[in-house]
Amino acid sequence: MTDHRERELIAKAKQGNMQAFEELILRHEKIVYNVALRMMNHSEDAKDISQEVFLKAYKNMKNFDERSMFSTWLYRITTNTCIDEMRKRKGKQSYSLEEELENEEGSIQRQIADEGETPEESLLREERKSELLQALDTLSEEHKAAVILRDIRGLSYEEVAEIVDLPMGTVKSRISRARNQLKNEILKIRERNEGKSRHKKGKEGRP
């Protein structure tokens, strides 16, 4: 729910107060960057997308419908901007699988790492992260957006439906299909990796 201070800032920003708009952006810039990073899988792209989102938000501030939360409105702009950019790059996009997935508390790598984990456990965690990123890359832009908002950002189905402007039943169906595709793609990736590993071991074992 929007707090009193945010409502004040929104009212001032809609009147053209740049300081109020900048304070609003400071409150939400990490969220915008976070969504852009997961959609684009590259920090420089996420920074560029974030700047574009803030510019769009500034230009359209007067049109912001205060029946929805400001963060929801920004999510929608961010998601649509990412989808547009991904469509432009279709077939040309390259991902950095080594990129750390950052969030407000730091990177997910640091967040989920156990200080007592063994080198083998650390390697397995990195492999799982790489598999997920590769699998996400196979989803359509719309499916990727929905599953990122729901399963990575942790938004409710209602919030996702509002952001993507679709009925909740459609959103649930889209997320369910995306999850099934992710699961199947991860299995394929693991099978390919295991096949490569067996082939490599076979070559090494030859005299």
Image (cartoon, grey):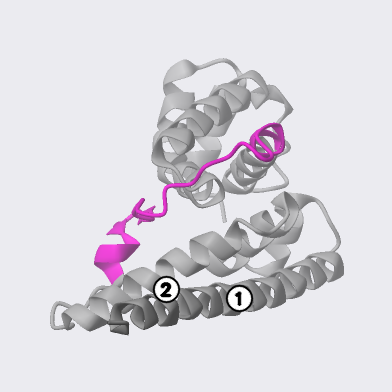
Q: Going 30% across and 64% down the picture, which residue do you hit?
A: 109
Q: Position of residue 111 (x, y in %)?
A: 28, 68
Q: Callout 2: 10 Å neighbours few (<14), some, many (20+)?
A: some
Q: In the picture shown, does residue 97 fall above or below 63?
A: below
Q: Which mark is drawn over residue 128? A: 2
- In the image, what residue occupies the spot 73% across and 27% down? 63
Q: Which residues are magenta?
A: 84-111
Q: Position of residue 62 (x, y in %)?
A: 69, 23
User: Residue sitting at 70 percent across and 50 percent down?
Assistant: 141
Q: Is residue 86 visible?
A: yes
Residue 64 percent coordinates (x, y): 70, 33
Residue 136 position by quadrant:
bottom right
How many labels sit on residues? 2
Measured as percent of width and height from the top left, residue 121 is found at 25, 82
119 lies above or below 56? below
Residue nearest the viewer, comparing 163 with 8: 163
Distance of label 2 from label 1 (alpha carbons): 13 Å
Q: Is residue 145 left or right of residue 13?
A: right
Residue at the spot of label 1: 188
Q: Is residue 106 left or right of residue 136?
A: left
Magenta run includes residue 89 = yes
**Marks 1 and 2: in contact by CB < 8 Å?**
no
Residue 191 part of the magenta-drawn span: no
What amino acid does circle 1 point to?
A: Lys
